[in-house]
Image (cartoon, grey):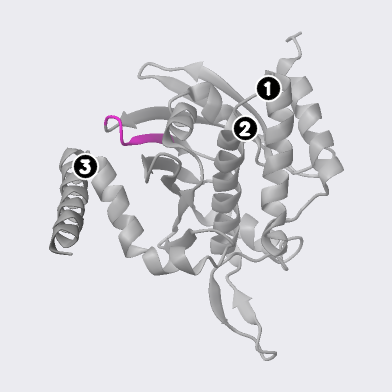
Amino acid sequence: MKLARLGSARLALGVLLLAIGAIAHASDEAIELLAKRTVFGPQLNARAFGEPLHLMSREKDGHLEGDVYAELDLHFAGVAAVLSSADAVCAMLFLHLNVRSCQVGHGGTGPQLVVSAGPKQASAMGSTYSMVYAMQVVSGGADFLGVKLTAPQGPLSTKDYSIVIEATPLDAKRTFLHFGYAYSYGSLAKMAMGIYLASAGRTKIGFTVVGTGPDGQPQYVQGERGSLERNVMRNYLALKAFASVQTGTPTAQMEARLRTWFALTERHAAQLHELDLDQYLQEKHADLARMVAPAR
């Protein structure tokens, strides 16, 4: 019995030393990101979204920020391959139903993503606008990879756009991910949002519970914060859908990713449903055809 206990103690000590060694060799970026997992552990474990995911948003002085932290059942190498490629990040963003095209260009300091966005249906009223994001990839070695996209200007007096995506492995099969999205807005954007929220957007909600209604049901955030939360979630699900499809021809992969993204968003239909599957695919196929059509 003493020998058995001694063997168990040695095994436990060996596991502990391996863990300490792994921490000692972890990059500063990975350690910082994993610290967030500890902070948001209760929310991740609650699985309020049907998966270990925590979403939060903030609004102050005309500045909006939203963040998703999630544990993915995807290996880190696959996620890192997406984040390290401008073409892959562009194709990922394209899955969002309001993104009509995304093209990769090159600026003086690195790749640029030219994103065109507009109404969810091309035939609908509303203007399409383009934004140019500068892309910067940050690597912390074998255990961390991040990408930052920044755009100084957006439509309707919006500015200072920032998309931050960070990933680090949890084990051989799982990855911890942070997706952050932020921008600032002025009076023109606030007025346009007010008009939208008083009409087509009056029933739209976000994910944060801000109270309880007379019927005892939760009341969700609306307005600018609600809109931000919907976009953060749609983009997070775009990354999840894109990284989960790794085999097949490019055409088959795109089709699978579109269908996967739609299925993931329908899990949160109260916030994210806009089109049925056939409508979404029709719009995206038309967008793809326009993107590859030769210029005249």
Residue at the spot 71% in from the left edge and 33% down from the top edge: 256
Q: Is residue 109 left or right of residue 215?
A: left
Residue reaching furthest to the bottom: 214
**Percent from the top left, x then y, of residue 273?**
74, 56
Circle 3 sits on which residue? 22
Q: Amino acid at mark 3?
A: Ala
**Residue topped by disc 1:** 248
Relative depth, front residue between 66 and 295 = 66
Q: Position of residue 129 (x, y in %)?
A: 64, 35
Give the mark, 3 or 2, whose residue is nearer the N terminus.
Answer: 3
The dominant secondary structure in magenta is strand
Residue 245's disc is: 2
> For the magenta stretch, what is the residue range?
141-150
| Element marked by disc 3 | helix
Residue at 57% over, 70% down: 221
> Which quarter shows the N terminus?
bottom left
Q: CA distance from mark 2 to mark 1?
A: 8 Å
Q: Residue at x 17, y 54 (%)?
A: 7
Q: Can you give x and y, in whole percent of width and height, for residue 128 in the image?
A: 69, 36
